[in-house]
Amino acid sequence: MSSASSTSNDEGKSGNTRWIICGLLFFSVAVNYIDRLVIGILKKPLSAQLGWSDADYGHIAAAFSFAYAFGYLFGGRLIDKLGVKKGLPIFVFCWSLAAAAHGLCGYIGLNEQFRMNYPWFSIAEGGITMATLVMPMTAAGFMFARIALGLTEGGNFPGAIKVVAEWFPVKERALATGIFNAGTNIGAILCPIAVPWMYSHIGWESTFYVTGGTGFIWLVLWKLFYNEPDQHPRLSASELAYIRSGQPVAGETSVKVPWLSLFRYRAVWAYVLASIFAGPAWGFYQFFLPDFLDKKFHLSLQATGWWTGAFFGVAAVGGVAGGWLASRFLGMGWSLNSARKVTLLICALAVVPVFLAPYAGSVWLAVLIVGLAGSAHQGWSANLFSVVSDTMPKDAISSVIGLGGFVAYFTGGFVNEFTGLILQRTGSYLWVFAYFSLMYLLSLALLHILVPKISPQAVAGKC
Protein backbone atom coordinates (compact mmCIF):
# COMPACT_ATOMS: atom_id res chain seq x y z
CA MET A 1 0.00 0.00 0.00
CA SER A 2 1.36 3.44 -0.82
CA SER A 3 2.33 5.90 1.90
CA ALA A 4 -0.31 8.33 0.67
CA SER A 5 -2.95 5.66 1.01
CA SER A 6 -1.71 4.73 4.48
CA THR A 7 -1.89 8.35 5.58
CA SER A 8 -5.43 8.62 4.30
CA ASN A 9 -6.41 5.48 6.10
CA ASP A 10 -4.85 6.64 9.38
CA GLU A 11 -6.75 9.92 9.13
CA GLY A 12 -9.93 7.95 8.51
CA LYS A 13 -9.59 6.18 11.84
CA SER A 14 -10.58 9.45 13.58
CA GLY A 15 -13.97 9.36 11.89
CA ASN A 16 -16.84 7.74 13.75
CA THR A 17 -19.71 7.68 11.27
CA ARG A 18 -19.30 3.95 10.73
CA TRP A 19 -19.66 3.40 14.47
CA ILE A 20 -22.87 5.45 14.52
CA ILE A 21 -24.16 3.05 11.87
CA CYS A 22 -23.00 0.16 14.06
CA GLY A 23 -25.00 1.75 16.88
CA LEU A 24 -28.14 1.67 14.73
CA LEU A 25 -27.58 -2.04 14.14
CA PHE A 26 -27.02 -2.53 17.87
CA PHE A 27 -30.38 -0.89 18.58
CA SER A 28 -32.20 -2.94 15.93
CA VAL A 29 -30.99 -6.30 17.26
CA ALA A 30 -31.74 -5.20 20.84
CA VAL A 31 -35.35 -4.47 19.82
CA ASN A 32 -35.41 -7.74 17.85
CA TYR A 33 -34.48 -9.74 20.92
CA ILE A 34 -36.74 -7.90 23.33
CA ASP A 35 -39.69 -8.74 21.09
CA ARG A 36 -38.85 -12.42 20.84
CA LEU A 37 -37.85 -13.00 24.49
CA VAL A 38 -40.90 -11.61 26.24
CA ILE A 39 -42.70 -14.92 25.94
CA GLY A 40 -39.83 -16.86 27.52
CA ILE A 41 -39.85 -14.60 30.58
CA LEU A 42 -43.64 -14.87 30.93
CA LYS A 43 -43.84 -18.63 30.25
CA LYS A 44 -44.68 -19.54 33.83
CA PRO A 45 -47.51 -17.03 34.46
CA LEU A 46 -48.88 -17.38 30.92
CA SER A 47 -48.96 -21.17 31.25
CA ALA A 48 -50.81 -20.88 34.56
CA GLN A 49 -53.27 -18.25 33.34
CA LEU A 50 -53.92 -19.67 29.89
CA GLY A 51 -53.71 -23.39 30.63
CA TRP A 52 -50.61 -24.33 28.66
CA SER A 53 -48.59 -27.51 29.14
CA ASP A 54 -44.85 -27.83 28.47
CA ALA A 55 -45.74 -29.50 25.16
CA ASP A 56 -47.98 -26.53 24.22
CA TYR A 57 -45.12 -24.16 24.90
CA GLY A 58 -42.81 -26.39 22.87
CA HIS A 59 -45.23 -26.06 19.93
CA ILE A 60 -45.19 -22.25 20.29
CA ALA A 61 -41.38 -22.10 20.46
CA ALA A 62 -41.05 -24.50 17.53
CA ALA A 63 -43.49 -22.43 15.44
CA PHE A 64 -41.32 -19.36 15.90
CA SER A 65 -38.15 -21.25 15.03
CA PHE A 66 -39.59 -22.72 11.83
CA ALA A 67 -41.03 -19.35 10.78
CA TYR A 68 -37.82 -17.55 11.66
CA ALA A 69 -35.94 -20.04 9.53
CA PHE A 70 -37.99 -19.13 6.46
CA GLY A 71 -37.84 -15.44 7.45
CA TYR A 72 -34.05 -15.67 7.47
CA LEU A 73 -34.00 -17.45 4.10
CA PHE A 74 -36.31 -15.14 2.19
CA GLY A 75 -35.42 -12.07 4.26
CA GLY A 76 -31.77 -12.39 3.28
CA ARG A 77 -32.68 -12.65 -0.37
CA LEU A 78 -35.05 -9.68 -0.18
CA ILE A 79 -32.40 -7.58 1.55
CA ASP A 80 -29.99 -8.35 -1.31
CA LYS A 81 -32.71 -7.33 -3.80
CA LEU A 82 -33.96 -4.19 -2.03
CA GLY A 83 -30.76 -3.06 -0.34
CA VAL A 84 -30.51 -2.45 3.39
CA LYS A 85 -31.56 1.19 3.25
CA LYS A 86 -35.06 0.25 2.10
CA GLY A 87 -35.30 -3.39 3.10
CA LEU A 88 -34.29 -3.35 6.77
CA PRO A 89 -36.89 -0.78 7.94
CA ILE A 90 -39.64 -2.75 6.17
CA PHE A 91 -38.78 -5.80 8.26
CA VAL A 92 -38.57 -3.79 11.50
CA PHE A 93 -41.98 -2.23 10.86
CA CYS A 94 -43.61 -5.59 10.18
CA TRP A 95 -42.08 -7.45 13.13
CA SER A 96 -43.05 -4.62 15.50
CA LEU A 97 -46.68 -5.07 14.47
CA ALA A 98 -46.39 -8.84 14.92
CA ALA A 99 -44.84 -8.43 18.38
CA ALA A 100 -47.65 -6.15 19.52
CA ALA A 101 -50.23 -8.57 18.08
CA HIS A 102 -49.42 -11.11 20.83
CA GLY A 103 -51.43 -8.93 23.20
CA LEU A 104 -54.55 -9.47 21.12
CA CYS A 105 -54.60 -13.11 22.27
CA GLY A 106 -56.08 -11.80 25.53
CA TYR A 107 -59.40 -11.58 23.71
CA ILE A 108 -59.49 -15.37 23.13
CA GLY A 109 -61.71 -17.39 25.47
CA LEU A 110 -59.83 -19.63 27.91
CA ASN A 111 -62.08 -22.64 27.26
CA GLU A 112 -61.73 -22.63 23.48
CA GLN A 113 -59.75 -25.47 21.90
CA PHE A 114 -57.73 -25.63 18.70
CA ARG A 115 -57.56 -28.84 16.67
CA MET A 116 -55.56 -29.51 13.53
CA ASN A 117 -55.04 -32.76 11.63
CA TYR A 118 -51.63 -33.33 10.07
CA PRO A 119 -49.77 -36.22 8.41
CA TRP A 120 -47.35 -38.16 10.61
CA PHE A 121 -45.02 -41.10 10.01
CA SER A 122 -45.94 -43.89 12.41
CA ILE A 123 -43.51 -46.74 12.98
CA ALA A 124 -46.24 -48.77 14.66
CA GLU A 125 -48.52 -48.51 11.63
CA GLY A 126 -45.67 -48.72 9.16
CA GLY A 127 -46.35 -45.56 7.17
CA ILE A 128 -48.00 -42.16 7.00
CA THR A 129 -51.04 -41.69 9.19
CA MET A 130 -53.07 -38.70 10.31
CA ALA A 131 -52.45 -37.23 13.75
CA THR A 132 -54.35 -34.50 15.56
CA LEU A 133 -52.79 -31.54 17.31
CA VAL A 134 -54.95 -30.34 20.19
CA MET A 135 -54.10 -27.27 22.27
CA PRO A 136 -55.83 -24.33 23.95
CA MET A 137 -56.89 -21.69 21.46
CA THR A 138 -54.81 -19.16 23.40
CA ALA A 139 -51.71 -21.27 22.68
CA ALA A 140 -52.71 -21.44 19.01
CA GLY A 141 -53.12 -17.66 18.96
CA PHE A 142 -49.64 -17.22 20.33
CA MET A 143 -48.35 -19.79 17.87
CA PHE A 144 -49.73 -17.82 14.91
CA ALA A 145 -48.39 -14.55 16.34
CA ARG A 146 -44.98 -16.18 16.75
CA ILE A 147 -45.10 -17.34 13.13
CA ALA A 148 -45.70 -13.75 11.98
CA LEU A 149 -42.92 -12.53 14.27
CA GLY A 150 -40.47 -15.15 13.03
CA LEU A 151 -41.16 -14.49 9.36
CA THR A 152 -40.55 -10.75 9.76
CA GLU A 153 -37.65 -10.81 12.22
CA GLY A 154 -35.64 -13.00 9.87
CA GLY A 155 -34.41 -10.11 7.73
CA ASN A 156 -32.60 -8.37 10.59
CA PHE A 157 -29.33 -10.28 10.81
CA PRO A 158 -28.78 -10.77 7.06
CA GLY A 159 -29.32 -7.04 6.67
CA ALA A 160 -26.99 -6.17 9.56
CA ILE A 161 -24.17 -8.34 8.23
CA LYS A 162 -24.57 -6.71 4.82
CA VAL A 163 -24.32 -3.27 6.44
CA VAL A 164 -21.11 -4.28 8.20
CA ALA A 165 -19.64 -5.55 4.92
CA GLU A 166 -20.41 -2.20 3.29
CA TRP A 167 -19.36 0.06 6.16
CA PHE A 168 -16.27 -1.61 7.68
CA PRO A 169 -12.84 -2.70 6.43
CA VAL A 170 -11.99 -6.39 6.69
CA LYS A 171 -9.99 -6.12 9.90
CA GLU A 172 -12.85 -4.41 11.77
CA ARG A 173 -15.73 -6.58 10.57
CA ALA A 174 -15.64 -9.18 13.34
CA LEU A 175 -15.35 -6.43 15.96
CA ALA A 176 -18.24 -4.46 14.46
CA THR A 177 -20.29 -7.65 14.22
CA GLY A 178 -19.48 -8.49 17.84
CA ILE A 179 -20.51 -5.01 18.97
CA PHE A 180 -23.84 -4.90 17.15
CA ASN A 181 -24.50 -8.53 18.06
CA ALA A 182 -24.03 -7.54 21.71
CA GLY A 183 -27.34 -5.73 21.24
CA THR A 184 -28.97 -9.14 21.43
CA ASN A 185 -27.63 -9.47 24.94
CA ILE A 186 -28.52 -5.95 26.01
CA GLY A 187 -32.05 -6.57 24.80
CA ALA A 188 -31.97 -9.88 26.59
CA ILE A 189 -30.73 -8.24 29.81
CA LEU A 190 -33.35 -5.49 29.75
CA CYS A 191 -36.16 -7.88 28.87
CA PRO A 192 -36.05 -10.17 31.94
CA ILE A 193 -35.60 -7.19 34.23
CA ALA A 194 -38.30 -4.93 32.76
CA VAL A 195 -40.89 -7.48 31.64
CA PRO A 196 -41.74 -8.90 35.10
CA TRP A 197 -42.24 -5.32 36.34
CA MET A 198 -44.47 -4.45 33.39
CA TYR A 199 -46.39 -7.69 33.80
CA SER A 200 -47.16 -6.94 37.44
CA HIS A 201 -48.18 -3.33 36.75
CA ILE A 202 -49.89 -3.31 33.34
CA GLY A 203 -50.64 -6.99 32.57
CA TRP A 204 -49.26 -9.29 29.92
CA GLU A 205 -51.29 -7.90 27.04
CA SER A 206 -50.01 -4.34 27.47
CA THR A 207 -46.50 -5.68 28.02
CA PHE A 208 -46.55 -7.03 24.47
CA TYR A 209 -47.98 -3.73 23.17
CA VAL A 210 -45.22 -1.67 24.81
CA THR A 211 -42.31 -3.91 23.79
CA GLY A 212 -43.65 -4.18 20.24
CA GLY A 213 -43.82 -0.40 19.99
CA THR A 214 -40.07 0.10 20.56
CA GLY A 215 -39.36 -0.79 16.92
CA PHE A 216 -41.09 2.37 15.74
CA ILE A 217 -38.54 4.50 17.62
CA TRP A 218 -35.77 2.75 15.69
CA LEU A 219 -37.51 3.50 12.38
CA VAL A 220 -37.29 7.24 13.09
CA LEU A 221 -33.57 7.01 13.93
CA TRP A 222 -32.84 4.96 10.81
CA LYS A 223 -34.57 7.55 8.65
CA LEU A 224 -32.54 10.34 10.25
CA PHE A 225 -29.07 8.79 10.28
CA TYR A 226 -28.68 6.03 7.68
CA ASN A 227 -27.45 6.25 4.12
CA GLU A 228 -25.05 4.22 2.00
CA PRO A 229 -21.34 5.05 2.47
CA ASP A 230 -20.88 6.71 -0.92
CA GLN A 231 -23.91 8.93 -0.33
CA HIS A 232 -23.71 9.62 3.41
CA PRO A 233 -23.49 13.39 4.08
CA ARG A 234 -21.65 12.95 7.41
CA LEU A 235 -18.97 10.58 6.10
CA SER A 236 -15.61 12.22 5.42
CA ALA A 237 -13.51 11.31 2.41
CA SER A 238 -10.73 10.02 4.69
CA GLU A 239 -13.06 7.71 6.62
CA LEU A 240 -14.53 6.43 3.36
CA ALA A 241 -10.99 5.68 2.18
CA TYR A 242 -10.30 3.82 5.42
CA ILE A 243 -13.48 1.77 5.02
CA ARG A 244 -12.38 0.83 1.51
CA SER A 245 -8.82 0.10 2.62
CA GLY A 246 -7.05 -3.24 2.82
CA GLN A 247 -6.76 -6.07 0.39
CA PRO A 248 -9.64 -6.46 -2.07
CA VAL A 249 -12.04 -9.13 -0.91
CA ALA A 250 -14.76 -11.01 -2.69
CA GLY A 251 -17.33 -9.45 -0.39
CA GLU A 252 -16.58 -6.00 -1.84
CA THR A 253 -16.92 -6.88 -5.50
CA SER A 254 -20.18 -6.57 -7.37
CA VAL A 255 -20.67 -10.08 -8.65
CA LYS A 256 -24.19 -11.35 -9.22
CA VAL A 257 -24.58 -14.84 -7.76
CA PRO A 258 -27.86 -16.66 -8.56
CA TRP A 259 -29.44 -18.07 -5.41
CA LEU A 260 -29.29 -21.74 -6.40
CA SER A 261 -25.65 -21.41 -7.44
CA LEU A 262 -24.71 -20.68 -3.83
CA PHE A 263 -24.79 -24.42 -3.17
CA ARG A 264 -21.83 -24.86 -5.50
CA TYR A 265 -19.42 -23.24 -3.04
CA ARG A 266 -17.68 -25.05 -0.21
CA ALA A 267 -17.62 -21.90 1.94
CA VAL A 268 -21.43 -21.84 1.80
CA TRP A 269 -21.68 -25.50 2.78
CA ALA A 270 -19.26 -24.93 5.66
CA TYR A 271 -21.40 -22.07 6.95
CA VAL A 272 -24.63 -24.04 6.48
CA LEU A 273 -23.35 -27.11 8.35
CA ALA A 274 -22.02 -25.01 11.21
CA SER A 275 -25.44 -23.33 11.38
CA ILE A 276 -27.20 -26.70 11.54
CA PHE A 277 -25.13 -28.12 14.38
CA ALA A 278 -24.24 -25.10 16.53
CA GLY A 279 -26.84 -22.52 15.49
CA PRO A 280 -29.86 -23.91 17.42
CA ALA A 281 -28.11 -23.48 20.78
CA TRP A 282 -28.88 -19.78 21.00
CA GLY A 283 -32.58 -20.33 20.37
CA PHE A 284 -32.57 -22.94 23.13
CA TYR A 285 -31.12 -20.44 25.60
CA GLN A 286 -33.69 -17.83 24.60
CA PHE A 287 -36.74 -20.01 25.01
CA PHE A 288 -35.78 -22.46 27.74
CA LEU A 289 -33.12 -20.97 30.04
CA PRO A 290 -35.65 -19.18 32.28
CA ASP A 291 -37.60 -22.42 32.58
CA PHE A 292 -34.41 -24.39 33.36
CA LEU A 293 -33.52 -21.98 36.17
CA ASP A 294 -37.07 -22.03 37.55
CA LYS A 295 -37.41 -25.81 37.47
CA LYS A 296 -34.03 -26.48 39.06
CA PHE A 297 -33.90 -23.71 41.67
CA HIS A 298 -37.62 -22.85 42.17
CA LEU A 299 -37.14 -19.11 41.68
CA SER A 300 -39.70 -16.32 41.71
CA LEU A 301 -40.57 -14.67 38.40
CA GLN A 302 -38.51 -11.59 39.26
CA ALA A 303 -35.52 -13.68 40.42
CA THR A 304 -35.72 -15.76 37.24
CA GLY A 305 -35.67 -12.52 35.28
CA TRP A 306 -32.61 -11.19 37.09
CA TRP A 307 -30.64 -14.41 36.68
CA THR A 308 -31.62 -14.66 33.02
CA GLY A 309 -30.44 -11.10 32.59
CA ALA A 310 -27.17 -12.07 34.27
CA PHE A 311 -26.73 -14.88 31.74
CA PHE A 312 -27.15 -12.50 28.82
CA GLY A 313 -24.83 -10.00 30.51
CA VAL A 314 -22.10 -12.62 30.61
CA ALA A 315 -22.89 -13.63 27.03
CA ALA A 316 -22.57 -10.01 25.86
CA VAL A 317 -18.88 -10.06 26.72
CA GLY A 318 -18.20 -12.92 24.32
CA GLY A 319 -19.47 -11.25 21.16
CA VAL A 320 -17.28 -8.19 21.63
CA ALA A 321 -14.32 -10.20 22.96
CA GLY A 322 -14.52 -12.71 20.10
CA GLY A 323 -14.60 -9.94 17.52
CA TRP A 324 -11.79 -8.07 19.27
CA LEU A 325 -9.65 -11.22 19.52
CA ALA A 326 -9.82 -11.89 15.78
CA SER A 327 -9.03 -8.24 15.05
CA ARG A 328 -6.12 -8.43 17.51
CA PHE A 329 -4.71 -11.50 15.79
CA LEU A 330 -4.98 -9.77 12.42
CA GLY A 331 -3.25 -6.71 13.85
CA MET A 332 -0.41 -8.96 15.00
CA GLY A 333 0.14 -10.03 11.41
CA TRP A 334 -1.73 -13.34 11.53
CA SER A 335 -3.35 -14.54 8.34
CA LEU A 336 -7.10 -14.18 8.01
CA ASN A 337 -7.41 -17.97 8.08
CA SER A 338 -5.46 -18.36 11.34
CA ALA A 339 -7.15 -15.43 13.08
CA ARG A 340 -10.65 -16.67 12.31
CA LYS A 341 -10.06 -20.38 13.03
CA VAL A 342 -8.08 -19.97 16.25
CA THR A 343 -10.77 -17.63 17.59
CA LEU A 344 -13.47 -20.13 16.58
CA LEU A 345 -11.51 -22.93 18.31
CA ILE A 346 -11.26 -20.96 21.56
CA CYS A 347 -15.01 -20.34 21.46
CA ALA A 348 -15.78 -24.00 20.70
CA LEU A 349 -13.68 -25.21 23.64
CA ALA A 350 -15.36 -22.73 25.99
CA VAL A 351 -18.78 -24.28 25.23
CA VAL A 352 -17.80 -27.83 26.24
CA PRO A 353 -18.38 -27.43 30.04
CA VAL A 354 -22.05 -26.53 29.48
CA PHE A 355 -23.00 -30.20 29.93
CA LEU A 356 -22.26 -29.69 33.65
CA ALA A 357 -25.01 -27.07 34.07
CA PRO A 358 -27.71 -29.51 35.26
CA TYR A 359 -25.34 -30.66 38.01
CA ALA A 360 -24.65 -27.15 39.36
CA GLY A 361 -25.44 -26.87 43.06
CA SER A 362 -26.29 -23.18 43.04
CA VAL A 363 -28.02 -20.79 40.68
CA TRP A 364 -24.95 -18.56 40.30
CA LEU A 365 -22.80 -21.52 39.29
CA ALA A 366 -25.38 -22.70 36.75
CA VAL A 367 -25.63 -19.20 35.27
CA LEU A 368 -21.84 -18.95 35.14
CA ILE A 369 -21.50 -22.27 33.28
CA VAL A 370 -24.27 -21.55 30.81
CA GLY A 371 -23.14 -17.90 30.55
CA LEU A 372 -19.68 -19.04 29.49
CA ALA A 373 -21.27 -21.14 26.75
CA GLY A 374 -23.49 -18.25 25.70
CA SER A 375 -20.53 -15.89 25.65
CA ALA A 376 -18.59 -18.35 23.51
CA HIS A 377 -21.58 -18.71 21.18
CA GLN A 378 -21.66 -14.94 20.60
CA GLY A 379 -17.93 -14.83 19.87
CA TRP A 380 -18.38 -17.82 17.57
CA SER A 381 -21.25 -16.11 15.74
CA ALA A 382 -19.34 -12.85 15.26
CA ASN A 383 -16.52 -14.71 13.53
CA LEU A 384 -18.70 -17.16 11.62
CA PHE A 385 -20.74 -14.27 10.19
CA SER A 386 -17.48 -12.60 9.24
CA VAL A 387 -16.32 -15.73 7.39
CA VAL A 388 -19.22 -15.14 5.01
CA SER A 389 -18.29 -11.51 4.35
CA ASP A 390 -14.63 -12.59 4.05
CA THR A 391 -15.37 -15.07 1.27
CA MET A 392 -18.55 -14.16 -0.58
CA PRO A 393 -19.42 -11.42 -3.13
CA LYS A 394 -21.18 -8.42 -1.60
CA ASP A 395 -24.40 -9.07 -3.51
CA ALA A 396 -24.61 -12.58 -2.06
CA ILE A 397 -23.74 -11.91 1.60
CA SER A 398 -27.30 -11.46 2.90
CA SER A 399 -28.48 -14.46 0.87
CA VAL A 400 -25.81 -16.71 2.40
CA ILE A 401 -26.48 -15.40 5.92
CA GLY A 402 -30.17 -15.98 5.28
CA LEU A 403 -29.52 -19.53 4.11
CA GLY A 404 -27.48 -20.30 7.23
CA GLY A 405 -30.12 -18.76 9.46
CA PHE A 406 -32.79 -20.81 7.71
CA VAL A 407 -31.12 -24.13 8.42
CA ALA A 408 -30.15 -23.08 11.97
CA TYR A 409 -33.66 -22.15 12.99
CA PHE A 410 -35.33 -24.91 11.01
CA THR A 411 -33.15 -27.36 12.91
CA GLY A 412 -33.85 -25.34 16.04
CA GLY A 413 -37.56 -25.85 15.52
CA PHE A 414 -37.07 -29.58 15.93
CA VAL A 415 -34.74 -29.00 18.88
CA ASN A 416 -37.39 -26.86 20.61
CA GLU A 417 -40.10 -29.38 19.84
CA PHE A 418 -38.05 -32.29 21.16
CA THR A 419 -36.98 -30.26 24.20
CA GLY A 420 -40.63 -29.70 25.10
CA LEU A 421 -41.34 -33.41 24.72
CA ILE A 422 -38.25 -34.38 26.74
CA LEU A 423 -39.33 -32.05 29.54
CA GLN A 424 -42.85 -33.40 29.41
CA ARG A 425 -41.57 -36.96 29.89
CA THR A 426 -38.41 -36.60 32.00
CA GLY A 427 -38.34 -33.09 33.46
CA SER A 428 -34.57 -32.99 32.74
CA TYR A 429 -32.42 -30.74 30.55
CA LEU A 430 -29.38 -33.02 30.78
CA TRP A 431 -29.42 -34.47 27.26
CA VAL A 432 -30.02 -31.11 25.59
CA PHE A 433 -27.03 -29.50 27.30
CA ALA A 434 -24.88 -32.54 26.53
CA TYR A 435 -25.83 -32.34 22.85
CA PHE A 436 -24.78 -28.72 22.47
CA SER A 437 -21.51 -29.14 24.38
CA LEU A 438 -19.81 -30.83 21.40
CA MET A 439 -21.56 -29.29 18.41
CA TYR A 440 -19.18 -26.35 18.02
CA LEU A 441 -16.09 -28.54 17.78
CA LEU A 442 -17.85 -30.67 15.16
CA SER A 443 -18.83 -27.53 13.24
CA LEU A 444 -15.27 -26.19 13.28
CA ALA A 445 -13.91 -29.51 12.03
CA LEU A 446 -16.35 -29.42 9.10
CA LEU A 447 -15.46 -25.80 8.37
CA HIS A 448 -11.76 -26.65 8.26
CA ILE A 449 -12.33 -29.65 5.98
CA LEU A 450 -14.46 -27.68 3.51
CA VAL A 451 -12.50 -24.42 3.65
CA PRO A 452 -8.86 -25.27 4.46
CA LYS A 453 -7.92 -21.62 3.96
CA ILE A 454 -10.27 -18.73 4.66
CA SER A 455 -9.40 -15.98 2.20
CA PRO A 456 -11.08 -13.74 -0.37
CA GLN A 457 -10.37 -16.45 -2.92
CA ALA A 458 -12.31 -19.10 -0.93
CA VAL A 459 -15.41 -18.18 -2.92
CA ALA A 460 -13.72 -19.83 -5.86
CA GLY A 461 -13.64 -23.14 -4.06
CA LYS A 462 -16.50 -24.94 -5.73
CA CYS A 463 -17.80 -28.34 -4.72
Image: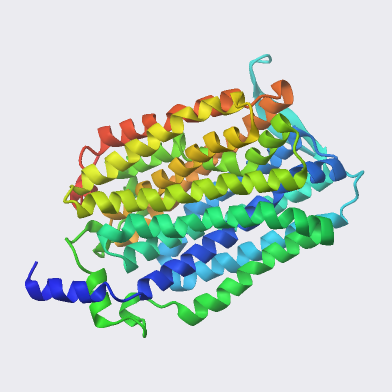
Farthest bottom residue? 233
Name the quadrant containing residue 133.
Answer: top right
* Residue toward you, 413 or 312: 312
Residue 74, percent from left and from top: 49, 55
Q: Position of residue 69 (x, y in %)?
A: 53, 47
Give the quarter of the figure containing the C terminus.
Answer: top left
| Residue 142 in the image: above or below residue 209 | above
Residue 342 lies in quadrant: top left
Residue toward you, 154 or 302: 302
Q: Residue at x 60, y 53 (%)?
A: 189
Left/right of residue 442 with respect to residue 340 in the rendered view: right
Q: Quarter of the image for the N terminus: give it.
A: bottom left
Corner quadrant of residue 164:
bottom left
Is residue 248 positioned above or below 415 on the image?
Answer: below
Q: In this picture, is 22 found above or below 51?
A: below
Q: On the rendered structure, is 427 left or right of 232? A: right
Residue sitting at 80 percent across and 59 percent down?
A: 205
Judge by depth and name the residue closer to the eye, 298 or 212. 298
Q: Residue at x 55, y 57 (%)?
A: 186
